[in-house]
Amino acid sequence: MSGRDLAAEARDLDAEARRHKREERRHRMAARDAREKLAAIERECARLGITLSINSGEGTVPWPKTSSSTSIR
C-alpha cells in the first residue's frame, strides 16, 4: 500500500469511528427519553390506582433441551 492509500484508509476509519460515536450518543439519548416516558406512565398509573407490571415475556426463557431438540453428530 502506498502512503496515499494508507492516509485514505485512515481518514475512512476515522470518519466511521466518528459516525459510531454520534450513533452511540443518539442511542443513549433515546434510551433516556424512553425511561423518562416510562416513569411518567408509571406515575400516571399510580395516580389512577393501576398497578403496572412489565413482563419481558416467555421469549427470554431458554427452551428446555430434550432428546428431540438436540442432535448428536
Image (tube, rainbow, N blue to C red):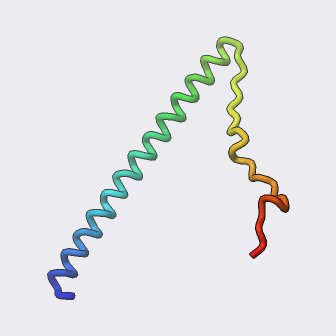
Count all numbered tags in the image, as a single digit. 0
Q: Residue at x 64, y 18 (%)?
A: 45
Q: Is residue 25 above or below residue 47?
A: below
Q: Residue furthest bottom?
A: 1
Where, quadrant-wise, is the C terminus in this rendering? bottom right
Q: Residue furthest top?
A: 48
Where is residue 67? Give x, y as percent. Answer: 84, 62
Where is residue 24? Give x, y as percent. Answer: 41, 52
Q: Is residue 67 above or below residue 37?
A: below
Where is residue 22? Give x, y as percent. Answer: 34, 52
Q: Is residue 13 above or below residue 40?
A: below
Given residues 4 and 71, the one toward you in this image is: 71
Q: Residue at x 58, y 28 (%)?
A: 39
Q: Residue at x 69, y 24 (%)?
A: 52
Where, quadrant-wise, is the N terminus in this rendering? bottom left
Where is residue 8? Give x, y as percent. Answer: 19, 75
Q: Residue at x 39, y 45 (%)?
A: 26
Given residues 47 and 1, the one toward you in this image is: 1
Q: Quadrant of residue 15?
A: bottom left
